[in-house]
Image (cartoon, rainbow, N blue to C red):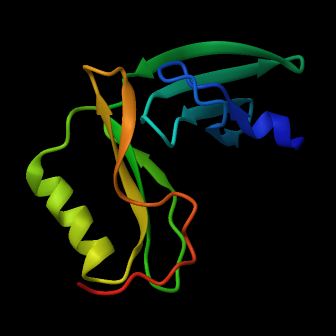
């Protein structure tokens, strides 16, 4: 798969490298686009007939932020908030990153500024050692 087919521009914040995840089963496939910055997500279900794609379902979800959690010694993907996260959710994620040795980041969408901001962590720092505080 060409690298250009693995990302698309975000439909909310304009980040150029929104992630593309795909799956296929028989003549059906699905594609999920997710922005790792603001959490905007688009989903498509595709039916293939005579090697031609027909989109049978498409939906978009506004992003209220995104996060990535990488457990010690493991790998995990990106996730999006499709509603403003509660303080309990943010506390749980923060505890994993700060106290439990997980790596990752949390970003939130700022409605007033119309852009995302980094709340905790660093998306480019996945191999860094996070000291317990």
Residue at image x 26%, y 63%? 93
Which quadrant holds the C terminus?
Answer: bottom left
For this rendering, which residue is in front, 72 or 52?
Answer: 72
Which quadrant holds the N terminus?
Answer: top right
Q: Quadrant of residue 102?
A: bottom left
Please indicate whether residue 87 sits to the left or right of residue 93 in the image.
left
Vertical placement of residue 39 versus 69, above or below? above
For this rendering, which residue is in front, 87 or 114?
Answer: 114
Please indicate whether residue 91 sits to the left or right of residue 58 in the image.
left
Please indicate whether residue 119 sits to the left or right of residue 42 in the image.
left
Vertical placement of residue 12 versus 15, above or below? above
Q: Position of residue 71 (x, y in %)?
A: 43, 77
Q: Position of residue 78 (x, y in %)?
A: 49, 52
Residue at image x 52%, y 86%? 73
For this rendering, which residue is in front, 20 or 68?
Answer: 68
Q: Position of residue 97 (x, y in %)?
A: 32, 72
Residue at image x 43%, y 34%? 38
Vertical placement of residue 73 versus 71, above or below? below
């Amino acid at each position: 798969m060409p690298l250009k087919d693995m990302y698309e521009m975000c439909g909310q914040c304009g980040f150029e490298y929104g992630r593309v995840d795909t799956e296929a089963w028989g003549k059906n496939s699905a594609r999920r686009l997710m922005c790792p910055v603001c959490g905007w997500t688009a989903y498509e279900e595709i039916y293939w007939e005579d090697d031609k794609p027909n989109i049978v379902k498409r939906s978009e979800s506004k992003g209220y932020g995104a996060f990535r959690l990488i457990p010690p010694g493991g790998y995990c993907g990106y996730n999006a908030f499709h509603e403003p996260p509660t303080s309990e959710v943010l506390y749980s994620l923060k505890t994993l990153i700060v106290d439990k040795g997980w790596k990752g980041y949390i970003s939130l969408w700022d409605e007033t500024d119309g852009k995302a901001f980094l709340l905790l962590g660093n998306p480019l720092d996945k191999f860094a050692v996070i000291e317990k505080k």
